[in-house]
């Protein structure tokens, strides 16, 4: 996932990260960075020929982003539910985009829409050795397989 330039410019990145963690997801990689044009085109390659791409490119190059790798039970669907629909006007109240988004381009966050997208996007932003493997004592409360794995 990524916090886009508007999330950082509006000083809500801490709030967004807190919501992800409060939902029980684990951040296993995170970095603030400026995206260059070639990285942006690789990341958004499915949108290259779409009419909105020039504005999207200009926007994502306009300031720093925070790229993250998130782990958790059904994390792709869960993150998309937490973020809400791409168009903030259509996003449910209580979602990040529903509460904080302004217009479709300035919708604060990006989340992979499938496992395939995630597997393609993660290496664009992170080397394998930048992704942490660690256990949290609270993980058992968010993944029943951990809580009951010691019971025969």
Image (cartoon, rainbow, N blue to C red):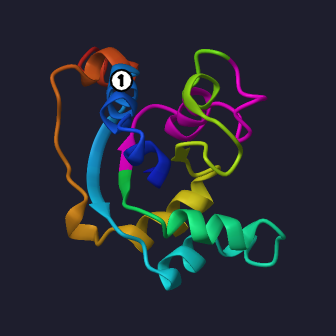
Residue 4 x/y as whole percent: 48, 52
- Extreme residue in the right direction: 51
Residue 121 x/y as whole percent: 50, 65
Res. 4 visible in picture: no
Q: Residue at x 57, y 63 (%)?
A: 59
Q: Quadrant of residue 126?
A: bottom left
Q: Residue at x 44, y 43 (%)?
A: 7
> Is residue 50 shown above or below 102?
below
Q: Which residues are magenta?
A: 69-92
Q: Quadrant of residue 20?
A: top left
- Magenta segment includes 143: no
Which one is in front, 74 or 32? 32
> Is residue 64 shown above or below 88?
below
Residue at image mark 1 = 24
Q: Quadrant of residue 36?
A: bottom left
Q: Is residue 125 left or right of residue 58?
A: left
Disc 1 crowd, CA 10 A, few/some/many (<14, 14-19, 20+): some
> Is residue 67 shown above or below 134?
below
Q: Is residue 151 left or right of residue 36?
A: left
- Magenta segment includes 82: yes
Q: Residue at x 60, y 31 (%)?
A: 97
Residue 65 x/y as whole percent: 39, 57
Q: Residue at x 34, y 20 (%)?
A: 22
Q: Secondary structure at mark 1?
A: loop
Res. 7 visible in picture: yes
């Amino acid at each position: 996932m990524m916090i886009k330039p508007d999330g950082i410019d509006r000083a809500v990145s801490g709030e967004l990260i807190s919501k992800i963690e409060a939902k029980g997801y684990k951040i296993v990689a995170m970095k603030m960075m400026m995206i260059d044009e070639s990285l942006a085109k690789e990341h958004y390659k499915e949108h290259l020929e779409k009419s909105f791409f020039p504005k999207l490119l200009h926007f994502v190059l306009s300031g720093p982003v925070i790229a993250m790798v998130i782990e958790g039970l059904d994390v792709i669907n869960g993150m998309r539910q937490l973020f809400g629909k791409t168009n903030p006007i259509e996003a449910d109240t209580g979602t990040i985009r529903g509460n904080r988004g302004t217009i479709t381009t300035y919708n604060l966050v990006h989340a992979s829409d499938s496992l395939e997208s995630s597997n393609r996007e993660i290496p664009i932003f992170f080397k394998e050795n930048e992704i942490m493997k660690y256990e949290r004592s609270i993980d058992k409360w968010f993944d029943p397989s951990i809580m009951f794995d010691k019971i025969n």
